[in-house]
Image (cartoon, grey):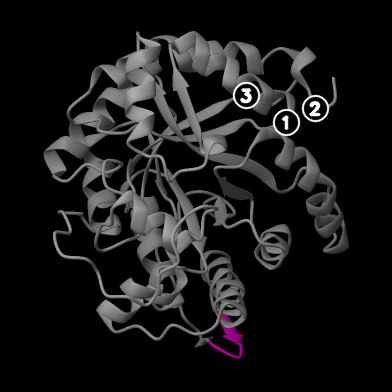
């Protein structure tokens, strides 16, 4: 029997149109997501917003115009709440939803303090934290907030050390770690997380070096905008890395982050999709609920059982969340339970 399908709703991303600006909007959407059977809600770890074109340039999507990624934040950034503070409030305003970070930037917080913050949130929420973390990418944000922005290899090394520190602090009563970038000495984390041995660790990123860190240290990896074929192509590489580190096949499970635009009318879905022309086609699932389910089916065949969906302009179009909850989520759960959809069948 394949693992159960899990579906999360991303409430904030730095890209305009893909975030809710006020806590009232976030709370209302989270409560609705809980009512419609979503498994989790997720917040990004960013401090200001950008338009789709600027996002595409910084992420270097094909077809995007070249631009210096260190450029200052554009004028007109819209309100975006800080992730940890907001998740703490959601821990009390929801009862079942798991609470995720998609994903924390390793350069924004000392990893020992981050481990303490995460343990506290896990306690407050009754064991509902999903701990997502990545190496960071938004150079303009680093510059704006005064954080050093080292080269990618250094950020990835920092990520690996940070994950090791967090795991030690969550499981060892007297944790000590000496690394090149971070160190702790008897950094007691009391109370520890509710979840044992620790909250699930997600690592965001698609590069080989990041996936090797995930294969050694994480429980999940989250891939942004991947088509189904890429999950199949990368699976042998990921499994080989897991075995290299003495972990069994399946120890690191994949998750897809995608834009979901469910509409009763295909024309309405296509019109909204046109507002995000800089997002690659493989990153968008749009159409009627039946169309969306048909697009998701190949991911299930590729072995993906976790989905994190961002639904654009949710405050103005709340019916999209209802359509997803009423028709899309139940359908893909049913398909995911079908053993005929196992990878390679």
Q: Residue at x 51, y 86 (%)?
A: 184
The residue stretch that appears in magenta: 175-181
Calculate the distance from the C-alpha at mark 1 to the C-alpha at mark 3.
11 Å
User: Is residue 78 visible to the viewer in this orientation of the structure?
Assistant: yes
Residue denoted by label 1: 303
Answer with left or right where residue 146 lies relative to residue 119: left
Do the residues under discs 2 and 1 have CB atoms within 8 angstroms?
yes
Answer with left or right where residue 208 lies relative to residue 38: right
**x, y percent for residue 140:** 33, 73
Foreground residue, 238 or 265? 265
Question: On the rendered image, what quadrant is the N terminus found in?
Answer: top right
Calculate the distance from the C-alpha at mark 2 to the C-alpha at mark 1.
5 Å
Q: Quadrant of residue 109?
A: bottom left
Q: Residue at x 85, y 26 (%)?
A: 344
Foreground residue, 336 or 87? 336
Magenta segment includes 27: no
**x, y percent for residue 253:** 68, 43
Upstream in sequence: badge 1 or badge 3: 3
């Amino acid at each position: 029997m394949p693992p159960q399908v899990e579906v999360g709703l991303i409430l904030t991303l730095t890209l305009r149109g893909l975030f809710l600006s006020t806590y009232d909007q976030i709370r209302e959407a989270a409560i609705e997501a809980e009512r419609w059977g979503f498994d989790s809600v997720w917040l990004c770890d960013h401090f200001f917003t950008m338009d789709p074109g600027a996002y595409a340039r910084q992420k270097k999507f094909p077809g995007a115009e070249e631009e210096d990624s260190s450029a200052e934040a554009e004028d007109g950034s819209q309100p975006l709440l800080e992730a940890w503070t907001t998740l703490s409030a959601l821990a009390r305003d929801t009862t079942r939803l798991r609470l995720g970070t998609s994903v924390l930037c390793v350069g924004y917080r000392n990893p020992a303090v981050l481990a303490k913050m995460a343990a506290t949130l896990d306690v407050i929420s009754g064991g509902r934290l999903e701990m997502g973390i990545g190496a960071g990418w938004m150079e303009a944000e680093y510059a704006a907030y005064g954080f050093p922005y080292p080269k990618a290899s250094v950020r990835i090394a920092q990520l690996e050390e940070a994950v090791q520190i967090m795991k030690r602090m969550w499981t060892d009563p007297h944790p000590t770690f000496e690394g090149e970038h971070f160190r702790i000495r008897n950094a007691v984390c009391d109370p520890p997380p509710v979840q044992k041995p620790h909250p699930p660790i997600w690592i965001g990123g698609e590069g080989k070096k990041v996936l090797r860190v995930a294969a050694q240290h994480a429980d999940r990896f989250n891939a942004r905008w991947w088509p189904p074929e890429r999950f199949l192509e990368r699976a042998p590489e990921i499994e080989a890395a897991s075995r290299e580190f003495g972990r069994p096949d399946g120890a690191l499970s994949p998750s897809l982050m995608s834009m979901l635009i469910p509409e009763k009318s295909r024309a309405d879905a296509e019109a909204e999709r046109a507002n995000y022309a800089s997002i690659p086609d493989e990153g968008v699932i749009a159409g009627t609920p039946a169309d969306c389910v048909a697009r998701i089916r190949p991911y299930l065949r590729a072995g993906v059982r976790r989905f994190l969906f961002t639904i654009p302009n949710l405050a103005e179009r709340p019916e999209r969340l209802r359509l997803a909850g009423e028709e899309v989520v139940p359908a893909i759960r049913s398909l995911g339970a079908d053993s005929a959809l196992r990878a390679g069948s």
